[in-house]
């Protein structure tokens, strides 16, 4: 096996371990519960054990050796899944077809920036804002069609920021645009993205992702939330703000990933506000967080505004809160209002 390839895998696994360990040690319990849907430390530990096992195999010279014939597993397979331990010759025909599809999909992911456009949707106002903390953002939002003609909306956040997070986000964004037109299920898209990220040596961190599918005929939004900060739904009939909590763990974070779909009805005047944690975790000069409670109150008070007006009100409140300081993390906001 190519020495350079081995070194790249080893370094990427070390980076993955460092990123996961640092996140688990530095994050408050509330964030860990949001990303994992669990506060059990064993969930993170089991993922670290998978990484440590692969590092141990690399140290012992047994990494990438087929358990059946003891030949070397193909580099393309190991790049897609560093835990692979069986040669292609020993796969069933069905497994081969699935692997070929995953390889084609992985190779189709372009690591280049895609500029989202705000769509025109009947009876819906949409506005968005994104400001990176570094030159390249680890956040993104995007809009795209699903197979059934429903309008897809996504907001995502890679752990960390800067160039590596930006490259990961660009890959996830491209994956969404490739996958959504072939299905009508947000859950299936997120499950596929999780498989792409979980054991792929090109990605060393995980992604939180809220993915919704809006049907303009029924005015229903079906969503899956993979460990992302809960969007706010203002319901004008009840005059209340509801939090759309995660329905699955963050993509690329844990073994045994599952996610659920939830469907809600949007009535005229209802507002859906999506954001990344750079907003709620922004800290002012006094050491106070902007916080979710402040955001809930603001959305409730400003729900009568247009989508663009709500984005403007949140930005103005944040700037006043920070008192001229620059936020330390990427910030992305999306407002959707039913008319």
Image: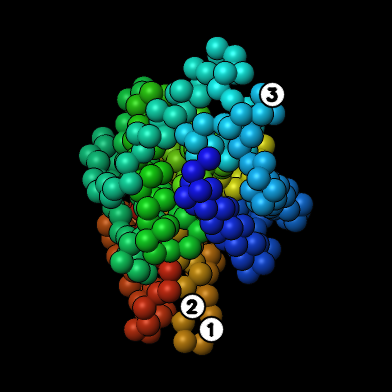
Q: Secondary structure at mark 3?
A: loop
Residue hosting label 2: 283
Q: CA distance from mark 1 to mark 3?
A: 57 Å
Residue drawn at the location 68% of the way across and 63% of the way down = 29
Give neighbour class at mark 1: few <14, some 14-19, many 20+ (Cα, 10 Å). few
In this rendered view, identify the residue nearer to me: 90 or 167: 90
- Between the residue at mark 1 and the residue at mark 2, the CA separation in whole angstroms equals 6 Å
Residue 298 in the image: state x and y as whole percent: 43, 65
Query: As displayed, is residue 64 above or below residue 326?
Result: above
Please state the horizontal and vertical placement of residue 320, each as a whole percent of the image. 37, 80
Where the C terminus falls, by quadrant?
top left
Q: Which quadrant of the structure image shows residue 34?
A: bottom right
**How many angstroms separate mark 2 from mark 3 (CA)?**
55 Å
- Label 2's element? loop
Dot placed on the residue nearer the N-terminal end, 1 or 3:
3
Residue 267 visible somewhere in the drawing: no
Give the labeled residue for mark 3: 68
Q: Residue at x 58, y 32 (%)?
A: 72
**Residue marked by disc 1:** 287
């Amino acid at each position: 096996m190519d020495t350079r390839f081995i070194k790249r895998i080893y370094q990427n696994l070390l980076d993955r371990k460092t990123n996961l360990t640092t996140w688990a040690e530095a994050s408050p319990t509330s964030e860990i519960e949001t990303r994992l849907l669990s506060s059990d430390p064993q969930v993170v530990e089991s993922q670290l054990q998978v990484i440590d096992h692969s590092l141990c195999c690399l140290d012992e010279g047994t990494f990438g050796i087929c358990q059946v014939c003891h030949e070397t597993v193909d580099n393309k397979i190991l790049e897609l899944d560093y835990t692979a331990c069986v040669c292609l010759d020993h796969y069933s025909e069905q497994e081969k077809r699935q692997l070929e599809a995953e390889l084609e999909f992985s190779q189709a992911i372009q690591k280049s920036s895609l500029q989202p456009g705000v769509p025109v949707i009947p009876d819906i106002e949409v506005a968005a804002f994104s400001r990176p903390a570094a030159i390249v953002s680890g956040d993104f939002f995007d809009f795209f069609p699903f197979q059934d003609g429903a309008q897809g909306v996504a907001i995502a956040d890679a752990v960390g920021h800067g160039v590596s997070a930006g490259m990961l986000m660009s890959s996830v964004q491209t994956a969404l645009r490739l996958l959504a037109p072939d299905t009508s299920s947000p859950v299936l898209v997120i499950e596929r993205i999780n498989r792409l990220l979980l054991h792929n040596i090109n990605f060393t961190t995980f992604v939180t992702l809220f993915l919704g599918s809006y049907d303009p005929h029924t005015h229903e939004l079906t969503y899956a939330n993979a460990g992302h900060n809960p969007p706010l739904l203002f319901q004008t009939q009840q005059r209340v703000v509801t939090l759309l909590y995660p329905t699955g763990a963050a993509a690329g974070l844990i073994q045994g990933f599952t996610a659920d779909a939830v469907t809600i009805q949007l009535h005229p005047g209802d507002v859906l506000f999506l954001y990344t944690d750079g907003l709620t975790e922004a800290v002012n000069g006094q050491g106070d967080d902007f916080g979710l409670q402040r955001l809930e109150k603001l959305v409730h008070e400003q729900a009568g505004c247009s989508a663009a007006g709500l984005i403007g009100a949140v930005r103005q409140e944040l700037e006043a809160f920070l008192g001229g300081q620059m936020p330390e993390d990427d910030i992305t906001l999306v407002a959707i209002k039913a008319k």
